[in-house]
Image (spheres, rainbow, N blue to C red):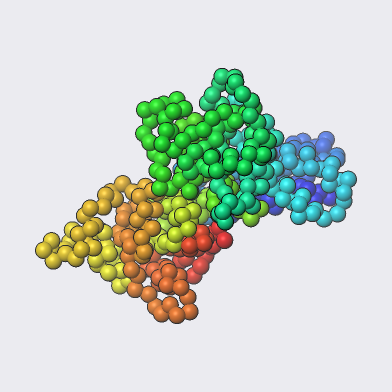
Amino acid sequence: MPSDPIGEAVAASIAEILGGSSVELRYSPDDAPRPVVTGGPGTVSAVGAGPPGWQATITVRLAERIAPLVTPAIGPLLEILGLLPDAGLRVAASFGALARAQPGPLSPALQRALRDMIVVEALRLHHAWGSSAPRSDLIAETVEFLIELSGTRVESHYLTHGVIITDVLIDTPRLEFRYPRDLRTVKRAPLLFDGQRAVLVVDREGRARTEVQSHRLNRLSPQPGAADAYSAEFSHSGALVAEATRRLGGVGFFLRADRTIWVFAGGDPLLIRRAEHWTTFPLALAAAITNAIGGHAATADVVVQAAFIISAQRHGAIFAIVDDPKRLDEVVSPKDRYDLRSSFDPMAMQAETRLHHLIEAGDLDAQILARLAALDGATILDREGRLLAYGAIVTSSDSQHEGARTAAATTLSHSAEIVLKVSVDGDITVLRAGEVIATLLG
């Protein structure tokens, strides 16, 4: 087999991006028939140019716990899965000459560039562009600009920035303002288009056109009567950029205050860059939760989305999903049980129980769940997504050697199917049966 450090680095990068997947890299002579790969749910492959005289095949298979859960609910992330093998081969081909000219181990800088370019190429191939994709250098320059901004502070605060690349405006602009080149010299630009109050609109030619303001989302929307799904309360998690992509098409980028870069299309988060690494971890997390609770992907998706929102807000929270509400009897006080609110004598109700009757949680979505979870205590659902408790004080063991939130989450994990603990630093820890099974964003 040929020596191919670039191909191996590309395969490793794809495996990292799609946590919970296996990536196989195979070679065959150029004159051999194109390899046939047996597909299936969660399996994608692509064939392209390899080292001189060889063709390379990259096959990506989702982990067994994830593949059976391939459903339309995680379609946006599965599209990224479908694009990565082809994107990886294209990047390997473009970097191959460089590696052959400089043999030896790949430098950290080259590995970072490979990771970024795989994502750039995958985004260029994304269906959100329709029939006309933007130049790959525009996407690459946008990512590079956001990386630069992620290390910039203004008055001791890290910057945020939001931009959407779309062709919602088809007229020729009177003034040409190139993105991001012409913004680099204007220090106030990221402050004006912070992704929370306003998002910059850039066309596919790389021309900055206008802004989308949080309180005037309908101005550019082709459907001005559309329901407003945006909530300013969650703007710092990228909600405004996400909503802009839902209404206007294209792909949106949001640099959060925690220095992560989030990519959105069609209103959904696709990819996240943190500490020089890209990941589609929502796929693995939602699938793992769905698997743990025996199905009910919609419940898992809502909990995961709410956890991301809380993570961006830098609030702590505990989410739990239980099989049988009776398992909460020994760890959660009846006064904190939303599901038991009507079982008490109205004349003897405590104030907390009365408050439950004012909360409308019959049709929970991520925003409602995140609002409730921002309160101290645990927010608990059943498998079907019905709210059982919020702001619940969990009766836990001695927390002398660990934080109160960690102790509560650990205790609750013995009664729940799955528990997510969000720290004030933004990390998301997944617990089950008293054990940590994953830590995300850390």
Front in this rendered view, residue 156 or 270: 156
Quick check: 83 left or right of 425?
Answer: right
Q: Quadrant of residue 333?
A: bottom left
Residue nearest the viewer, comparing 344 with 327 = 344
Query: As displayed, is residue 87 above or below residue 378?
Result: above
The residue lying at 70 percent from left, 52 percent from top is 12
Task: Tell me: 195 left or right of 103.
Answer: left
* Number of dots carrying numbers: 0
Residue drawn at x 60%, y 20% is 174
Q: Which quadrant of the figure contains the C terminus?
A: bottom right
Q: Position of residue 61 (x, y in %)?
A: 61, 48
Residue 326 image point, x, y percent: 28, 66
Does 244 sit left or right of 277 as displayed?
left
- What residue is rendered at 33% in x and 68% in y? 393
- The picture places residue 276, in percent across and down from the top left corner, at 66, 53
Give the farthest residue toward the left. Answer: 347
Task: Relative to 370, say whether 395 is above or below.
Answer: below
Between 100 and 246, the one lying in front of the other is 246
Compare residues 288 and 127 and report the one nearer the observer: 127
The answer to whether residue 147 of the structure is visible from this angle is: yes
Q: Is residue 298 visible?
A: no
Does residue 73 appear left or right of residue 251 in this picture? Answer: left
Q: Residue at x 41, y 40 (%)?
A: 230
Residue 67 in the image: state x and y as whole percent. 54, 49
